[in-house]
Image (cartoon, grey):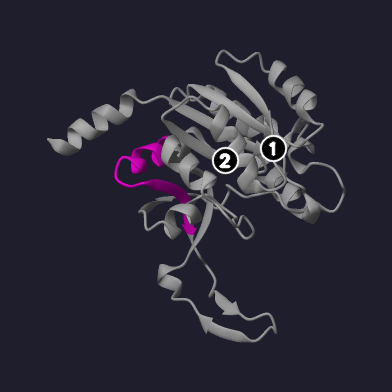
Amino acid sequence: AAEGDRRSKESRMKVSGIILAGGSSTRYGTGENKTLAMLCGRPVLEYSLRVFLGSPAVDEVILAARAGEEATLRTVVEGLSPEKPVTVVTGGKDRAESVQNALTAAKGERVLIHDGARPLVTKELLEDCLAALAQADGAAVSVASPDTVKLAGADGYVEHSTDRSRTYLIQTPQAFYRKELLKLHRSLTEREGITDDCMLLERAGRRVKLVPGCRENIKITTPADRELAEFYLKKGTE
């Protein structure tokens, strides 16, 4: 009964979708913002934005833009004629600061945080993340690692291997309770090395639930990744 009451309460909580589109894109190699690169005739960002706007689970969308690109992101939004509120905020000097700025602007009790460079996200992944949040302090989409993962020192020598049966590759979306995550962000004294928001919960001893994802939900980091995303998109329309 208690579990049912919690799920009922969760279903009444508003959800803010946060899409990060302000990264430095240094590994992309062309100097352009990879979320604004063209993918099958559309900006990469547009794909995930369409999914968030089309999901009945999401009440509003917050876009974190690179400084100077706010107007460009607003143009992408206007082209979709959204029926729900979309706010563009200026990102920070790193991912953690961009998330904090977006969390501050958001109004929902729950948030879904997503990398704008992952165009193949689905509504089902959003819903699965939110469902898992009812059982934990945070939730993240993941896939089991197909390879053996080794940790190495700065000198390039292997220190030890992880247990492949327990090793997962983390993706987005990730789901959190907004006020709790914002509090953790504001208490950060060292932002370097924060590559996802689950790390803040882990450091605070909170529980993060992993949600089964899919390998197609790739992050575009290099031009080769964009070519792979194009392959998946064209395959899906066959």
Residue farthest toward the right in the current orientation of the protein: 30
Does 19 appear in magenta? Answer: no
Which residue is under mark 1? 91
Considering depth in this image, is 113 or 37 the residue closer to the camera? Answer: 113
10 Å crowding of disc 1: few (<14), some (14-19), many (20+): many
- Residue 173: percent from left, percent from top: 52, 42
**For this view, does 16 lie left or right of residue 38?**
left
- Residue 142: percent from left, percent from top: 48, 54
Where 68 falls versus 78 (above or below)? below
> What kind of residue is marked 2?
His
Where 54 falls versus 92 (above or below)? above
- Residue 69: percent from left, percent from top: 80, 31
Q: Quadrant of the N terminus?
A: top left
Q: Earlier in the sequence, mark 2 or mark 1?
A: 1
Q: Quadrant of residue 48?
A: top right
10 Å crowding of disc 2: few (<14), some (14-19), many (20+): many
Where 153 falls versus 194 (above or below)? below
**For this view, does 58 lie left or right of residue 37?**
left
- Residue visible at 87% across and 49% down in the picture: 30
Magenta span of residues? 127-143
> What kind of residue is marked 1?
Gly
- Residue visible at 55% across and 16% down in the picture: 84
Which residue is under mark 2? 114
**For this view, does 43 lie left or right of residue 147?**
right
Q: Quadrant of residue 235?
A: top right
- Mark 2 or 1: in front is 1
Does 141 appear in magenta? Answer: yes
Residue farthest toward the left in the current orientation of the protein: 1
Q: CA distance from mark 2 to mark 1?
A: 14 Å
